[in-house]
Amino acid sequence: MTWLDRENPARLAVELTIHERMLLASLLEQLVDVLFDDSDPAMQRLLPDAYRDDEEAAAEFRRFTAEGLAERKIANARSVLDAVGNNVEGVQEPEDRVIVLDDVHAKQWLRALADLRLIIANRLGIERDDDEGRTDDAAVPLQQSYQWLGELQESIVHALDK
């Protein structure tokens, strides 16, 4: 799935099938939508309060930082969308695509994948690493996406550590 580029070890190569690219593109588009919707409960996971014991200080901090943080998260998501090809629906033949990332783009990927996992964790009711979250039939696709994103994230981290 992910490996170092043999021609340039400073770059990382990520291979995704058309289905993986379509899934990732769809999830990233949803992430951008969430970041524009202050009323979505997942926003609390994406932009948590800096001062949990002081609502006034938390509101003041959020007033000065939330927009900039959201903009950076949107930029990360759009960078990954550009790399996977956000218009993959018109592809007739199933094709794999190798995406080569430099260090800056790899970090954007890691941040965007973390944000996606936070949103899905919120939807599943996962609060900590050892939580299972919802397991009803409707939660199965979310659980699978959550696991796959974690595996992709882990493979990028391991490749960067080499």
Image (tube, rainbow, N blue to C red):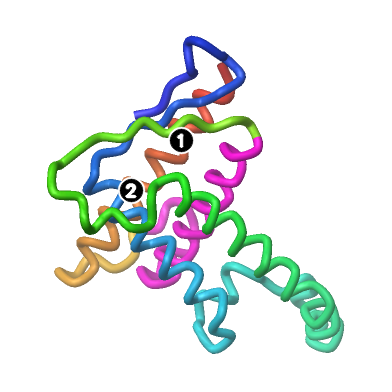
* Front residue of 161 and 30: 30
> Which residue is farthest top?
7
Q: Residue placed at 80% from the left, 80% from the top? A: 58
Image quadrant occupied by the N terminus: top left
Q: Residues within 10 Å of mark 2 (few under 14, many from 20)?
A: few
Give coordinates of residue 93: x percent, y percent. 13, 43
| Boundaries of the magenta span | 104-131
The residue indicated by pointer 1 is 154
Question: Label for residue 80?
Answer: none
Q: Nearer the viewer, residue 147 or 72?
A: 72
Local secondary structure at mark 1: helix
Disc 1 and disc 2 in contact, CB within 8 angstroms? no
Q: Amino acid at mark 1?
A: Glu
Residue 112, magenta (yes or no): yes
The residue where tag 2 is placed is 147
**What secondary structure do most residues of the magenta stretch adopt?**
helix
